[in-house]
Image (cartoon, rainbow, N blue to C red):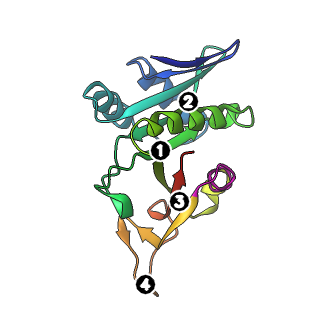
Amino acid sequence: MIYYKNDVLMIRSMVKSDIEKLVNGFIEQGWHKPYEQFGEYYSQQENNEKLVIIAEFSGEVAGYVTLLPYAKGGPFAHKNIPEIVDFNVLIKYQKRGIGTKIMEIAENLAKEKNEYVSLSVGLHSGYGSAQRMYVKRGYIPDGTGVWYNGKQLEPYSECVNDDGLTLYFIKFLI
């Protein structure tokens, strides 16, 4: 399904050939995102377990986001609130409005299910751009504090500032 299209940007559903293109795109920027991860995303999309939204810029895969129909973990688990998960725009395509358009589409799709949408974001500096974008888009922390590897951290608990250290946000979709 095509959600958006102009002269250079198309936002659409994932197709099987995107798997290899995404893996190679991340290899080019020095990141390891395994083929199996994107293969699983494609299977989940085909089984209607999640939406996988792909951005194509000038015919090249530039980024993606997945949207769960409802959060399966964290503070919004089983509350029928959709969750945006694993949002990425390849570095060479950033600062072109692609991420903003992907998020806009994901939020519009989430609005079909609920008046709220949730997400979590990592806390180390590698997530700095995403953190800023989410706040600018109206996401607010949910108030449950920091989570680590899917579990709410008790005050003064030890943790590691890796990808498992996150904060949950929610947005009211007007």
Residue 123 visible in rendering: yes
Mark 3 and mark 2: Cα distance apart in space: 21 Å
The numbered mark at residue 122 is 3
Q: Is residue 12 above or below residue 90?
A: above
Give the foreground label among 2 and 1.
1
Q: Position of residue 104 (x, y in %)?
A: 59, 35
Horizontal relation, residue 57 to residue 157: left or right: right
Q: Can you identify the residue that label 1 sits on?
A: 86
Horizontal relation, residue 141 to residue 19: left or right: right
Q: Of marks 4 and 3, which one's residue comes earlier in the chain? A: 3
Crowding near the residue tagged with mark 1, few <14, some 14–19, many ≥20 C-alpha atoms within 10 Å: few
The numbered mark at residue 157 is 4
Name the amino acid type tagged 1.
Answer: Asp
Name the amino acid type tagged 3.
Answer: Gly
Q: Which residues are magenta?
A: 130-139
Which residue is at 46% across, 46% downward? 115
In depth, the one of 92 and 86 nearer the eye is 86
Which residue is at 47% across, 39% downward? 111
Q: Quadrant of residue 55?
A: top right
